Image (spheres, helix red, strand yellow):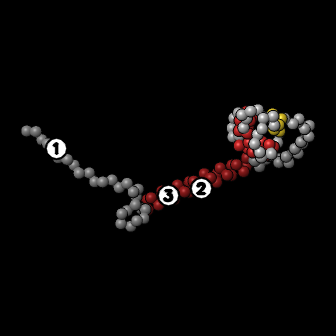
Amino acid sequence: MIAIARPRVIAPLNLRGGWPTDRGQPSAAVRRWRAVLVMSAIAVCGTLLGAGSLAGAGQATEPPAPVVTAALPPSPARVHIVQPGDTLWSVARGLQPDGDVRPLVARLRASSGEGQLVPGQRLRLDA
């Protein structure tokens, strides 16, 4: 005769980590475990802060050296002569192939007199 095994009923797992369903608070074991974790974290932080402050205690502090700036001679003004079909954007992209050219376009617009570009017009590029 062949015996057929009966299925077992398994009770659902309590996945709430020590929270009894009737009180809504963690068990004493969970509270102790949390207290140990908090105390350990505080001890580790205190040790690291203490070691860091002792590491720099023997070093003499010196004031930073003064910054000396040399006056550079003024660079000659660069000028771009507008060609037929040139726009502020195309001139700016030619000067700055990478990155955002909007600030450069704004400076070129200010140096062009806020008007239309005319072939033969001179744009100062150091503005």
Residue 106 located left or right of residue 62? left
Residue 33 in view in this figure: yes
Q: Which residue has dot 1 on it?
A: 5
Mark 2: amino acid: Ile
Q: Residue at the location (74% across, 42% down)?
A: 105
The first of marks 1 and 3 along the sequence is 1
Quarter in which the C terminus is drawn: top right
Residue 27 vertical placement versus 126 (above, below): below
State if disc 3 and disc 1 touch (CB < 8 Å). Answer: no
Q: Residues within 10 Å of mark 2 (few under 14, many from 20)?
A: few
Q: Which residue has dot 3 on it?
A: 34
Residue 76 vertical placement versus 29 (above, below): above
Frontmost residue, 49 versus 22: 22
Q: Residue at the location (87% across, 44% down)?
A: 67
How far apart are the alpha carbons under marks 2 and 1?
A: 55 Å
Mark 3: amino acid: Arg
How far apart are the alpha carbons under marks 1 and 3?
A: 44 Å
Q: Secondary structure at mark 3?
A: helix
**Residue 71: x %, y % from top left:** 91, 40
State if disc 3 and disc 2 touch (CB < 8 Å). Answer: no
Q: Which residue has dot 2 on it?
A: 42
Residue 104 in view in this figure: no
Nearer to us: label 2 or label 1: 1
Kindly indicate the quadrant of the structure image that contains residue 121: top right
Frontmost residue, 101 versus 112: 112
**Residue 33: x %, y % from top left:** 48, 56
Q: Residue at the location (40% across, 60% down)?
A: 19
Q: Secondary structure at mark 1?
A: loop
Q: Residues within 10 Å of mark 1 (few under 14, many from 20)?
A: few
How far apart are the alpha carbons under marks 2 and 3?
A: 12 Å
Kindly indicate the quadrant of the structure image that contains residue 104: top right
Frontmost residue, 19 versus 84: 84
